[in-house]
Image (cartoon, rainbow, N blue to C red):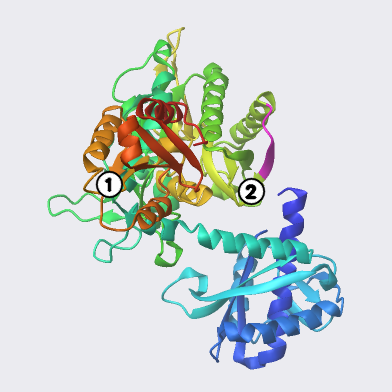
């Protein structure tokens, strides 16, 4: 974690302790603290309440929090014995459960004290004093099961934010207001892009014609570039036997988050696939390979499925069915650098098309939990250092993401910043020695010996669903021309006098490959123009007698700007140029 994020994390963590202290002082035995969740962006507190807490109680709690902060209480760390810890936590079954887990994992037991009276089982880190929390706000309330287990207690979760200055808090609240306007669920509904159905099930998006077109445009763009670079598209089934995932290692790690299928005709344990890589190994293994065949580059947009918990589902951001622009390259060790450079350059081109700024995160092992990772630790050391060399050679800004590695390989994860300054993980590149070895993949080398290929995992957009969500909110639905489901809306002033010419305009534009609709409804001209603007259509053509007489069109942009009268040929050329150039401008 970089220095700025580390400081934000400390402030959030310390603010959660102040919140916990405040509710204990205010409500005493009516609340039992359970667990905190901290990131550098927010904090939340899960507790068991004997009374109903609502957002109307926030001002009272915030007042008490401010009193604690104003006391400038030191926040200090103390290492305690197991016996002392059990005594300190004897009245809190939730904290005792955490304690016994830490004891079983042979972890050092530490408490953090705020002043001398409030303490909590915690590993930190924190700021030195409560006065370093200079601005905070409680945001919302939701329910949460203890330890995410629906068979355990239902707790009340309170979300909050904290900052080192009031200006930062004000900026954050303004960003939240803008984010509400850009919420992809609302825009997706208003623009008729996708929907959900209780009969289909939570987390399974249904795409309308416009939304399905947007998906195809995104996938088509990636496939076009991949084909130029020598990638070949494959297609794999959405179902596989459990043995495949046991062999890859995914079963032990993820089978509780996979959809299991029941067959009337076989006893095989079957699952909907949550990722493509294990099946791609079987295409590679389907025939003998030579060093001359490598590299082999497979891409796959097949659907994937993951059994996400209901409380974690959120529009297109977290779904149960999705597809990825997956690519797996099987290559020799001496080909790795060139293949990764190729992938990084493709990623750079695609991300610049959407106008995203980005940096990379080097996602490595957590040295405290080596049991989470498969493979030889020396190979891990080699690949992590290799990834650093690759990013330095490509002059890539990156930061460390300790503990963010996949269980089989470190990752070079691209973190993109959207129009609101929010950061999202999109593409990833991974150098994998583990899976080819587990599947016993081979190729015959130039000296006749059999060797194991290296498997490179690569995605650029990542999940298409999640990328659509990011794009919708990044552009607030005002997509570039090439991505707009409807690029032109033709509006005849009079459906009697101007309809025939307007229909000819539509026909001509469609023959040029431009996506166009006509609105000849009985609504007023102003309402029809406004409706087209609300649907974020890039170009609005108003057709009256003057345009018919001059064989022209009158062009308006969705932002209200007018380009005025131009020939249909010039207008058509303009749209096609914006389309082919993948321009961000109208």
Residue 98: within the magenta?
no
Q: Nearer the viewer, residue 292 or 443?
A: 292
Q: Residue at x 31, y 48 (%)?
A: 493
Tell me the distance, in whole angstroms, between the alpha carbons under discs 1 and 2.
44 Å
Instruction: Say left or right for 112 vs 516.
Output: right
Residue 396: within the magenta?
yes
Using the image, determine if residue 271 lies above or below residue 440. Answer: below
Question: Label 1's element?
Answer: helix
Q: Nearer the viewer, residue 433 or 545?
A: 545
Q: Which residues are magenta?
A: 395-400
Crowd band around label 1 with a 10 angstrom C-alpha radius: few (<14), some (14–19), many (20+): few
Using the image, determine if residue 78 lies above or below residue 244. Answer: below
Residue 159 on image: x %, y %: 60, 72
Task: Report the mark closest to the observer, 1 or 2.
Answer: 1
Q: Are marks 1 and 2 in contact (CB under 8 Å)?
A: no
Q: Quadrant of residue 568?
A: top left
Using the image, determine if residue 206 lies above or below residue 80. Answer: above
Instruction: Say left or right for 31 vs 572.
Output: right
In the rendered structure, which disc, 1 or 2, sits on the residue that comes first in sequence?
A: 1
Which residue is disc 1 drawn over?
209
Residue 277 on image: x %, y %: 39, 36
Q: Residue at x 47, y 27 (%)?
A: 581
Instruction: Say left or right for 551 vs 503.
Output: right
Q: Nearer the viewer, residue 538 or 212?
A: 538
Which residue is disc 2 drawn over?
366
């Amino acid at each position: 974690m970089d220095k700025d994020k580390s400081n934000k994390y400390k402030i959030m963590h310390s603010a959660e302790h102040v919140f916990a202290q405040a509710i204990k002082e205010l409500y005493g035995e009516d609340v039992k603290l359970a667990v905190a969740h901290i990131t550098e962006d927010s904090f939340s507190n899960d507790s068991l309440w004997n009374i109903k807490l609502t957002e109307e109680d926030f001002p009272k709690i915030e007042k008490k929090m401010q009193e604690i902060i104003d006391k400038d209480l030191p926040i200090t760390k103390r290492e305690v014995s197991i016996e002392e810890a059990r005594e300190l936590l004897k009245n809190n079954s939730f904290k005792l459960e955490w304690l016994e887990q830490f004891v079983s994992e042979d972890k050092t037991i530490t408490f953090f004290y705020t002043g001398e009276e409030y303490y909590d089982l915690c590993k930190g880190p924190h700021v030195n004093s409560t006065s370093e929390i200079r601005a905070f706000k409680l945001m919302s309330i939701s329910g949460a099961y203890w330890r995410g287990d629906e068979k355990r207690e239902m707790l009340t979760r309170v979300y909050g934010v904290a900052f080192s200055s009031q200006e930062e808090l004000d900026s954050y609240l303004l960003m939240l207001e803008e984010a509400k306007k850009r919420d992809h669920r609302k825009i997706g509904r208003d623009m008729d892009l996708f929907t959900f159905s209780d009969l289909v099930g939570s987390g399974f998006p249904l795409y309308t014609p416009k939304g399905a077109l947007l998906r195809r445009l995104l996938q088509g763009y990636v496939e076009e570039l991949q084909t130029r670079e020598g990638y070949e598209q494959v297609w794999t089934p959405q179902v596989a036997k459990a043995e495949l995932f046991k062999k890859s290692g995914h079963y032990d790690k993820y089978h509780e988050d996979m959809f299991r299928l029941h067959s009337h005709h076989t006893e095989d344990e079957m699952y909907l696939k949550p990722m493509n890589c294990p099946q791609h190994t079987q295409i590679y293994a389907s025939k003998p390979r030579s060093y001359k065949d490598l590299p082999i580059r497979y891409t796959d947009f097949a659907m994937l499925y993951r059994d996400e918990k209901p409380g974690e589902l959120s529009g297109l951001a977290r779904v149960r069915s999705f597809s990825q622009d997956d690519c797996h390259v099987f290559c020799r060790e001496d080909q790795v650098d060139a293949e990764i450079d190729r992938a990084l350059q493709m990623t750079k081109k695609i991300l610049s098309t959407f106008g995203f700024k980005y940096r990379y995160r080097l996602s490595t092992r957590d040295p405290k939990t080596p049991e989470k990772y498969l493979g030889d630790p020396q190979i891990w050391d080699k690949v992590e250092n290799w990834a650093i060399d690759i990013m330095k050679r490509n002059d890539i800004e990156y930061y460390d993401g300790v503990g963010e590695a996949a269980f089989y390989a470190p990752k070079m994860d691209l973190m993109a910043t959207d129009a609101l300054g929010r950061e999202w993980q999109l593409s990833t590149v991974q150098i994998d020695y583990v899976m080819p070895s587990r599947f016993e993949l081979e190729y015959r080398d130039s000296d006749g010996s059999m060797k194991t290929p290296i498997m490179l995992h690569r995605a650029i957009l990542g999940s298409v669903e999640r990328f659509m969500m990011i794009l919708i909110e990044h552009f607030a639905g005002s997509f570039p021309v090439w991505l707009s489901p409807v690029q032109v809306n033709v509006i005849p002033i009079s459906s009697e006098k101007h309809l025939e010419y307007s229909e000819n305009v539509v026909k001509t534009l469609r023959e040029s490959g431009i996506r166009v609709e006509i609105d000849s409804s009985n609504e007023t001209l102003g309402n029809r123009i406004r409706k087209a603007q609300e649907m974020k259509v890039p170009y609005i053509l108003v057709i009256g007698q003057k345009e018919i007489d001059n064989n022209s069109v009158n062009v308006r942009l969705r932002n209200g700007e007018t380009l005025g009268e131009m020939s249909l040929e010039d207008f058509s050329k303009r749209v096609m140029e914006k389309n082919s150039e993948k321009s961000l401008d109208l």
